[in-house]
Amino acid sequence: MLPTIFQEAIPLIKRIEEAGFQAYFVGGSVRDYLLGRPINDVDIATSAFPDEIKSIFPRTADIGIQHGTVLVIEPFGEYEITTFRTESEYRDFRRPDQVEFIRSLEGDLKRRDFTMNSLAMDADGVMYDPFQGQADIKQRIIRTVGAPSDRFSEDALRMLRGIRFVSQLGFDMEPATRNALKLNENLLTHIAVERKTMEFEKMMGGEYKDLAIHLLLQSCLFKQLPGLADKRNTMEKIADFPLLKCLSKDQTWLLLLACIEERPAEFLKEWKLPSKMIKERTKEKQILSIRTKEGWTKELLYQSGLQRANNVEKVYNCLHSISPSSIGKLKDEFESLPIKSREELNVTGRDLMQWTGRKGGPWIKEVLGNIEMAILHGEVRNEHEMIRRWIETCSPSEKN
Ligand code: ATP
Ligand code: MG
């Protein structure tokens, strides 16, 4: 029996078939199903043209109609349904500006990047596999559909996609495909940073990043990545960390910042990453520097918060090849802090003003900070009345 995520979409396929068209599951979901990996979302490809799909289903949205994709909204979920297409016009080594809708499944599978991604599965679980994707999945091989250099010069991003699949799946790249990376490396200059970043981030989240980084180095593709063109030695060093596997995407960015040692925010900006992400990683980089020099103190742990402290410690462990057991200890230490964030403080600026009879001003922030530290070090308990007495008795200077 097919996994639930496919089962739920079968009624849609049946409805398209009843209207006289073909429809199949395609792309990553079929590949991941064969690999026994978790499936994120299912894509459906069909011989019906977008208008025909829209006449079959009552609720739809045009999310990418110029590329043939219609979003079908059903009570139990939303599905992207894409018309079979060929991509004839490639200009500037980028995605085609023109697509042509076709009625043939094989034509559609032929335009896909790798054999493992060119499988289609019908509602009964029968596979359509004109490019021997199943055999390549069995042998754990990444191979382009057709001549690799042709496919990479049509859309240079495919090279980075191939490398991120190496990272996610641990597959080998078939020799001709691998050689074509090196031959076409410079075509990646035509690809927008945002598209590179999307693939690179997926690569950083993969379990086999070491293999992927070695491939980036071997093919010289790293020269086309923001801020990394002159970082061969750094990348080599990163690929060799035994604990690299254990790092998440965000932690791998932090590791990269730690190893590059240049202005972290500028480096991340080159990748056009969201400003929130840039802020977080930059902050973690600062914490990592302090942790490296001075170790964890209660203050540092408190000011970091558990999430950041965890990221920093994981990267510290990776840099020094320390077994991850210190993570548990760090978590225990955090849990035993008498206060974990300013929100937990049982006193407000308003209380301070009332107790002291003073007007508001910058002093409030300072006194609240002193109270936080006193609680953190066990000098006073985090209770309203205790804090009031502590202010009066232990800290008379703060009354005026
Ligand atoms: P993921 O699990 O990360 O979503 P995926 O294989 O589903 O992986 P998508 O980017 O979602 O990747 O693309 C869906 C499918 O569209 C791919 O499996 C592939 O068949 C095809 N595809 C995507 N990008 C390209 C491309 N640049 N060139 C050719 N085919 C592509
Ligand atoms: Mg997908």
Image (spheres, rainbow, N blue to C red):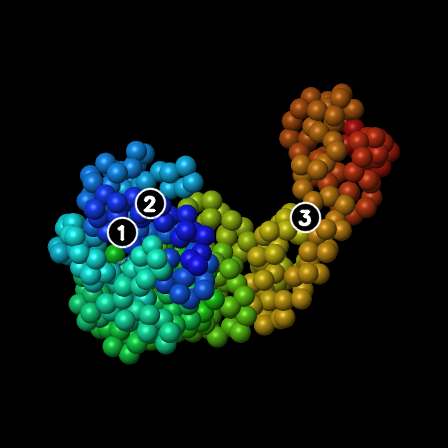
* Circle 1 crowding by C-alpha within 10 Å: few under 14, some 14–19, many from 20: many
Measured Cα–Cα span from mark 3 to mark 1: 55 Å
The residue under label 1 is which amino acid type? Answer: Ala
Residue at image point 69% right, 58% down: 330
Measured Cα–Cα span from mark 2 to mark 3: 52 Å
Q: Secondary structure at mark 1?
A: strand
Q: Nearer the viewer, residue 44 or 86?
A: 44
Q: Earlier in the sequence, mark 1 or mark 2?
A: 2
Instruction: Specify the quadrant of the image occupied by residue 211.
Output: bottom left
The correct choice, above or below, for 131 with respect to 48 in the image is below
* Residue 335 point in image, percent of width and height: 72, 51
Residue at image point 37% right, 57% down: 29
The residue under label 2 is which amino acid type? Answer: Leu
Q: Which residue is mark 3?
A: 302
Instruction: Specify the quadrant of the image occupied by residue 141.
Output: bottom left
Q: Is mark 2 within 8 Å of ligand 2?
A: no
* Circle 3 crowding by C-alpha within 10 Å: few under 14, some 14–19, many from 20: many
Q: Which residue is mark 2?
A: 12
Residue 23's label in the rendered image is 1
Q: Are marks 1 and 2 in contact (CB under 8 Å)?
A: yes
Q: Nearer the viewer, residue 320 or 151?
A: 151
The residue under label 3 is which amino acid type? Answer: Tyr
Q: Secondary structure at mark 3?
A: helix
Q: Nearer the viewer, residue 399 or 260?
A: 260
Q: Earlier in the sequence, mark 2 or mark 3?
A: 2
